[in-house]
Image: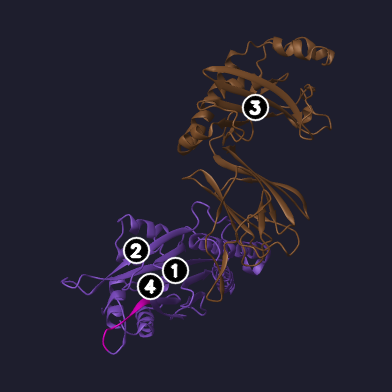
Amino acid sequence: MEWVFAGDSDVGKVRQNNEDAFHCDAARGILMVIDGMGGRAAGEVAAEIALRLIRARLERRTGTVKERIREAITLANNEIFKQSQTNPDRAGMACVLTVAVIEGDQLTAGHVGDTRLYEIRARPAHSAHSKCRIEKVTRDHSPVGEREEWGRLTELEAMRHPQRNEVLRAVGAAEHAPDDDGFIEIFERPVSPGSAFLLCSDGLSDLVTSAQMLKVIERQSGAPQEAVRQLIAAANDAGGKDNITVIYAATVSRSRNEGSIFHFPFEI
Amino acid sequence: MLGNLREGLEPLRYSVVAPGVYHVYLHERDYGRLQGIFPRIQQEARQALTEELQALEQAEPGAGLGAPMQSRLKGRLPKWMRGAAPGAEARKRDYQAPAEGWQIAFHPDADGELQPGDVSVHSLLTLPPQIEMGEGLTTKTVMTLRRDGQLSHWESYSTADGPTPKPPTPAPEDPLATNRSSVPTDKTEILYAVIRYEDDAGSHIFEMAKELVVIGRGGEGYWVDIALRTSARVSREHLRLRYDGASGKFYLKDLSSFGATVNGETMPSSMQEVNGERRDINREIVLPLRARIVLAGMVAIDFEAASGKKTQ
């Protein structure tokens, strides 16, 4: 299966600095979105440590994918925690993240906090609805996210909730082992020609509904870079109150005529 | 096992220590047949052992040393310990479950001594260290064989240094020391195995209380549970050892450059060159319940499966 990845990050309209980080590696099938937290520049430092250590572990393909992801996030967690304990400028720094690895016919994601992974799939051809549907794969580890999960808040109510920016889990808040309960949550999804995924920081999902995301993706099916650009623009149009990071990954299918490239789920 | 518990009790002055480690040997056919329910048997056996110990404690007459112990130790005890000490009449002794929890392991009978249906139980009592004065740990072993409904027991003592049988030489516990509670706490975790090894930093004991253990020198970007301080011939990520709950077996995977041996045999490497990149092809071996693993000829690791609960 051939994939095309596109990703970008934007400071938004309110913040002075961008504490988000992202990484897409199409050759190895690695995708991650990291949202740093902490005063002064500490959030950026936390995101940078996480990116470096997670890449180092994931690029060495030993152990199962799940083991790799758990160990990678734990290495980042313990290093951020150690530095936050020993360096006063970095006290309290942490990050939230979603890391996905596509290997063979499966996507495996490790998740801590309130960044998100969405799956986009085509509806059956005869469906009267729009061409695709979007489904949130990860569950936010946040008080508001949990209430939304239980159906006590709608997506829009959750987006406007004053406690929106509180998280229950973070990378670097306490020392951990890879398989600790209440730390990393793992999600697995089968992939097939037609699979597409979106990873984002809460700078997008707090301001743009999943239905709006889907509209952009459907319109820009053949141009993932453009889809990412338009999603970031939509968040900025809605106020851009936080850093915005988006990764879009879609399988590539070649049409029977002329070998031109389309990005499923929109053309088969 | 309950027979071993009763036979293996070590009565001290203020407490009675129970054997904590039980090795259950079965005929190979029975072992294969029962393998799937070992975790269940272990769970039920632990409960039965705890209940039996509580029943024994309640039945304790409240006198000093019991009669069998009196006769066995006569002449070897300090004078004040021989009879019931004043005030000891009313005091019940504390029956102590092992601090590490009941450890129960099943083994197929490799020697062919057992018939189908036979059960041989070897229990070990590791006496508190203060009992031996500078002589290493004393272990009391009870072996029970159940054959055709008949039970037979053997008892032996040995030190960690060698198998020489020697009589127990209990010393009085400090009367001022508070009795440790034998009540297990709610928070328990499973102890899968005990791993002993020596590296440049000394000798270590690692209790395997999780299903996956990564062994190697470690380094940036490397998660290891056992970080070895040794020659660079040992890889940063050398071995991955895991317990598989479904099969009840331990699996070992070699990811190193310079390999490993298990009980003297070279194990296959799981690393293979795929399109110019070294990749883990997920090749594992089943690890025997007791094994000596040598990494790159540099570090020896003694692995011993020890199923049981560890109280925190």
Q: Nearer the viewer, residue B293 or A33?
A: B293
Q: Image quadrant of residue B144?
A: top right
Judge depth for marks 1 and 4 and give the one in front: 1
Q: Which residue in the protein does label 1 denote?
A: A103
Asked which secondary structure carries label 3, the reply is loop
- Amino acid type at mark 2: Ala
* Disc nearer the start of the sequence (1/2): 1
Q: CA distance from mark 4 to mark 2?
A: 20 Å
Please provide the residue range marked out in magenta.
A249-257
- Amino acid type at mark 1: Glu
Give the chain coloured purple.
A
Chain identity of mark 1: A
Q: Which residue in the protein does label 2 denote?
A: A158
For residue A198, the mark is: 4
Asked which secondary structure carries label 1, the reply is strand
Q: What secondary structure prevails in the magenta region?
A: strand
- Amino acid type at mark 3: Pro
Judge depth for marks 3 and 2 and give the one in front: 3
Give the chain coloured brown.
B
- Give me the residue at 28% from left, 72% from top: A211
- Amino acid type at mark 4: Leu
Marks 3 and 1 belong to one chain:
no
Against A113, residue A210 (above or below) is: below
Q: Nearer the viewer, residue A42 or B125?
A: B125
Chain identity of mark 4: A
Q: Which residue in the protein does label 3 denote?
A: B19
Chain identity of mark 3: B
